[in-house]
Image (cartoon, rainbow, N blue to C red):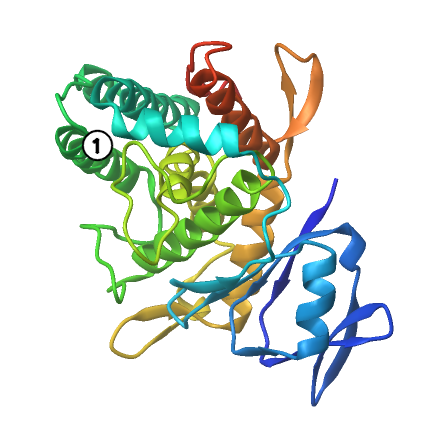
């Protein structure tokens, strides 16, 4: 299986022959382009025309983040997996209020199930999460329900943290260390979801729970939300509670951000969680957590084509 490649230094991506290199004044490293799923750049990185050409040939997207870990944009090659039939059906399900509402509710059920799975693994009281009714007569109302779910989840999550306090969710910029970790983790998960969606026939801008807007791939938001509790928040609890992420791993200006060492620790652990293998109960084989995101996309494709009824992931690990 192809792997993500993470760049945490400033530099240049350029092509030499049939090889992609990352270079700066201290480093020159070949990137195994044939075995790379996507590239994540957490510091300013320039792409030469030669690099763009080989990235296009190998269908490898490059995602960029700012210093606070927020997603800034991507270089995305021309779509390799295209199906007019799927896109038309996807748009029909978005435009039909009843069909869209069904899928949006399923996404919300998946989010709640993942929250419960994480809290259950920590033997936390998740009864308030279970009691929230997944109700709403429109995607906007369901988004309100989702907001309430996250508020409940944040409170329980905060009680599980050691060594750091987490009182409220703050963004742009994050105001404390835990918010900095959440923001970065959510951004990375969004781009991983985008990369996995591109391997299906779905269009990443046609969503069901979130509203499609310019300058974002809203289906990636839908899909990533299901996986946040069991990836991003699981990694944060593990790193913080085991003191592998500490106060000295952060810098502060108008907001809080990971320093270079903290960034490497966090990204390494998040990548390990995304590539972690779990035994799939139906396939009876081990698959990675990030591959489960692609399977979620395939399930949605089968639903909109009328081949099966979509049911969201229920994390079992």
Count of numbered circles in the view: 1
Q: Position of residue 51 (x, y in %)?
A: 70, 72
What residue is shown at x 25% (from left), y 23% (from top)?
96
What residue is shown at x 47% (from left), y 72% (from top)?
259
For the residue pair 176 and 294, the one nearer the viewer reads as 294
> Please, is residue 290 above or below residue 6 in the view?
above
For the residue pair 155 and 147, the one nearer the viewer reads as 147
Compared across the picture, whether 95 is left or right of 43 comes to left
Q: Position of residue 49 (x, y in %)?
A: 67, 78
What residue is shown at x 24% (from left), y 77% (from top)?
254
For the residue pair 298 and 99, the one nearer the viewer reads as 99
Compared across the picture, whether 92 is left or right of 137 comes to right
Q: Position of residue 153 (x, y in %)?
A: 25, 33
For the residue pair 207 and 240, the one nearer the viewer reads as 207
Q: Residues within 10 Å of mark 1 (few under 14, many from 20)?
A: many
Q: Quadrant of the N terminus?
A: top right
Q: Position of residue 100 (x, y in %)?
A: 28, 24
Asked which quadrant contains residue 127, the reply is: top left
Compared across the picture, whether 295 is left or right of 163 comes to right
> Please, is residue 6 above or below residue 47 in the view?
above
Asked which quadrant contains residue 26, the reply is: bottom right
Compared across the picture, whether 43 is left or right of 254 comes to right
- Residue named by callout 1: 146
Give the structural element (helix, strand or loop) at label 1.
helix
């Amino acid at each position: 299986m192809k792997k993500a490649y993470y760049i945490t230094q400033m530099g240049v991506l350029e092509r030499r022959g049939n090889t992609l290199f990352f270079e700066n004044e201290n480093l020159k490293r070949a990137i195994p382009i044939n075995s790379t799923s996507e590239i994540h750049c957490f510091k300013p990185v320039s792409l030469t025309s030669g690099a763009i050409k080989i990235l296009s040939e190998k269908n490898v997207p490059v995602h960029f983040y700012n210093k606070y870990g927020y997603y800034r944009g991507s270089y995305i090659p021309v779509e390799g997996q295209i199906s007019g039939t799927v896109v038309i059906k996807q748009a029909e399900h978005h435009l039909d209020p009843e069909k869209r509402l069904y899928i949006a509710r399923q996404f919300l059920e998946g989010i709640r199930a993942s929250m419960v799975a994480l809290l259950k693994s920590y033997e936390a009281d998740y009864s308030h999460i279970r009691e929230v009714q997944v109700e709403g007569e429109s995607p906007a109302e369901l988004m309100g329900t989702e907001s309430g779910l996250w508020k409940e989840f944040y409170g329980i999550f905060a009680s599980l943290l050691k060594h750091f306090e987490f009182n409220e969710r703050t963004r742009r910029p994050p105001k404390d260390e835990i918010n900095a970790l959440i923001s970065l983790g959510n951004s990375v998960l969004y781009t991983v979801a985008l990369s996995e969606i591109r391997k299906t026939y779905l269009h990443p801008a046609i969503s069901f729970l979130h509203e499609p807007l310019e300058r974002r791939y809203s289906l990636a938001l839908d899909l990533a939300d299901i996986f946040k509790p069991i990836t991003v928040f699981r990694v944060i609890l593990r790193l913080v509670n085991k003191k592998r992420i500490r106060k000295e791993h952060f810098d502060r200006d108008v907001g809080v951000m990971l320093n270079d060492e903290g960034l490497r620790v966090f990204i390494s652990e998040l990548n390990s969680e995304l590539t972690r293998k779990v035994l799939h109960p139906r396939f009876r084989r081990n698959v990675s957590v990030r591959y489960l995101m692609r399977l979620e996309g395939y399930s949605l494709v089968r639903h909109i084509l009328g081949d099966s009824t979509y049911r969201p992931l229920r994390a079992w690990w």
